[in-house]
Amino acid sequence: MKPAAIVVMMFLFVVAFLHFLRVLLSIEITVNGLIIPVWMSVLACLGPGALAVWLWREERASSSQES
């Protein structure tokens, strides 16, 4: 696996995990007086999580073809 792909994949997993924790712990976030609903973190968890899994599977498939 290429180093850049590993870094991006880990970053996406961390972002997804932090949003998942926000959903589990029901942490309230306020930005400039506006409360960000928790359900938005569900979407923000699914997006980066799906991209990270997609990148991982693509890298794994390409590395098995090279062997």
Image (cartoon, helix red, strand yellow):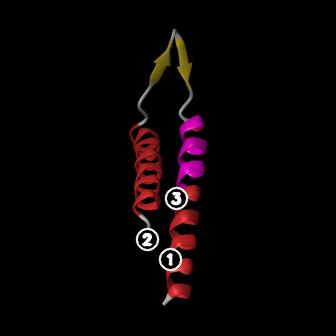
Question: Marks 1 and 2: which is nearer the front?
Answer: 2
**Image coordinates for residue 49, horizontal then vertical, percent:** 53, 55
Query: Is 44 colored magenta in this rendering?
Result: yes
Task: Find residue 1 and name its label.
Answer: 2
Q: Are marks 1 and 2 in contact (CB under 8 Å)?
A: yes
Which residue bears the numbered disc 1? 60
- Judging from the image, what secondary structure is the residue with disc 3 in? helix
Residue that appears at 52% across and 9% down: 33
Q: Are marks 3 and 2 in contact (CB under 8 Å)?
A: no
Task: Find residue 52 and name its label.
Answer: 3
Q: Amino acid at mark 3?
A: Ala
Q: Nearer the viewer, residue 14 or 42?
A: 14
Q: Residue furthest top?
A: 33
- Judging from the image, what secondary structure is the residue with disc 1 in? helix
Residue that appears at 52% across and 72% down: 59
The secondary structure making up most of the magenta span is helix
Q: Are marks 3 and 1 in contact (CB under 8 Å)?
A: no
What residue span does the magenta drawing correspond to? 40-49
Measured along the vertical axis of the image, is residue 28 above or below residue 66?
A: above
- Judging from the image, what secondary structure is the residue with disc 2 in? loop
For the N terminus, the quadrant is bottom left
Q: Residues within 10 Å of mark 2 (few under 14, many from 20)?
A: few
Query: Spatial distance from mark 1 to mark 2, Cα to Cα?
Result: 7 Å
**Image coordinates for residue 18, horizontal then vertical, percent:** 41, 43
Residue that appears at 43% across and 35% down: 26
Q: Nearer the viewer, residue 13 or 22?
A: 13
